Image: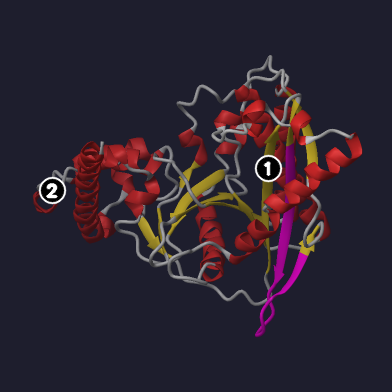
Amino acid sequence: MDKNLDKALSQLVEEIERVEVTKNRFGEVLHRIKDMISLDRFPAIASCAVETTFTKNIEPTSLSGLQIAGIDGGLVRRRFRSMDLILIRGIAVVFRFGPEEGPDVDFFPDPFPEPQIRPMMLTLSATELDQLASLERVAAELRVTLSVLDEFHTDLILVDGSLFYHPRDRPQSGSVVYEKFQEVLSLYKQLYNKVRKKGTTLVGIVKDSRSSRITSILGDILPHILREPAIFEMMQGVDYRWLLKISRDCDILDTFLEEGERSFVFRYSSELQNNSNLQSDDLGNWASSIWVTYLKTARNDLPLRIEILIDDDSNANVSKVDKALAAVLPLSWQHPEYGIPTPILEADARARITANETSMVIDRLMALSGLTYTTLEKRRSRNPFGGS
């Protein structure tokens, strides 16, 4: 068994080395040619990209006088015999930056709000339970964001995650979860409209994006770029097609973006064109108003995927994107290996529901109901012989 394990691990090491060597060589080439790439040469790309520049440097701005909010939500799910319980919490952290000293900080609704409890029926399928739990968390975050717009004057609102629902959260129209999904869609629309009315910039910070839109675009345009003999020679021996096939956008962009540099901007709607789980009665009309880019905020961290709600489809909105990124940069300079904006870090820490909090809720449930762990917990959760 040990020999088989060592053999498998050795093969894995070889594969990792192959990936890293290929990434390094690919990045060296892209670093040399990125300033020569103009997207207007590729009509097929023009429908999703909103500019011709492949990459662009962002100059950080002073935060003095700005009010910037970070929004996040926490979720814990506990499974019992007769039902599932979810604990959710949404919180906003509002930073008010002065001319010199550190920012003043406000919280909404409280510095450490109590988690809300939601029961879920066991008649739901496993997929529906997952969807309902996710939708409850999203709804909590959206309600907090709407309240922040009413309670504070904010220049920038940073939301932890995407500005658009994930396709896997969309239940079938006949599902009992569909009503909750419709509620979340309504909250999204309220948020989009209120942000525009208030003149606030809404930004989604996606920390661990698995998107491959830019790798797909690179796969389309590189064969044309490599027709240039000098560039073809640079790429000799680099299996870029294989690399693009196995990589996410963040991984590929990390090979050639410098700190403070962003990728070209494209419309979120271009990622949804081939998605059968998006219906015309959803938020499809808003998807083209969400613009997406990747910004490398820290020297030794992957680029962040950043989504921004813009006012219209005018190319002049590129300056709005860059203005928002110019504020995100200095907010993300706490550590060279972790480039997450401070308001998001603070909101994340306060939204997280700890094991102690969860235990307190369950203990209180038992005290009020007279039930015991043996009655509540599923069989596998109380296995006296170990295992799970």
Residue at the location (55% across, 64% down)?
328
Give the numbered dot on residue 76.
1
Residue stretch in magenta: 86-106
In the structure shown, which secondary structural element does the residue marked by tag 2 occupy? loop
Disc 2 target residue? 228
Q: Is residue 53 above or below residue 96?
A: above
What x and y, as percent, mark residue 379? Answer: 66, 26
Nearer the observer, 294 or 301: 301
Residue at the location (45% across, 66% down)?
58
16 part of magenta stretch = no
What x and y, as percent, mark residue 113? Answer: 80, 55
Q: Is residue 363 above or below residue 85?
A: below
Residue 333 vs residue 179: left or right?
A: left
Query: Marks 2/1: CA distance?
Result: 54 Å
* Mark 1 nearby-residue class (10 Å; few <14, some 14–19, many ≥20): some
- Three-letter amino acid code at the position of disc 2: Glu
Report the mark closest to the observer, 2 or 1: 1
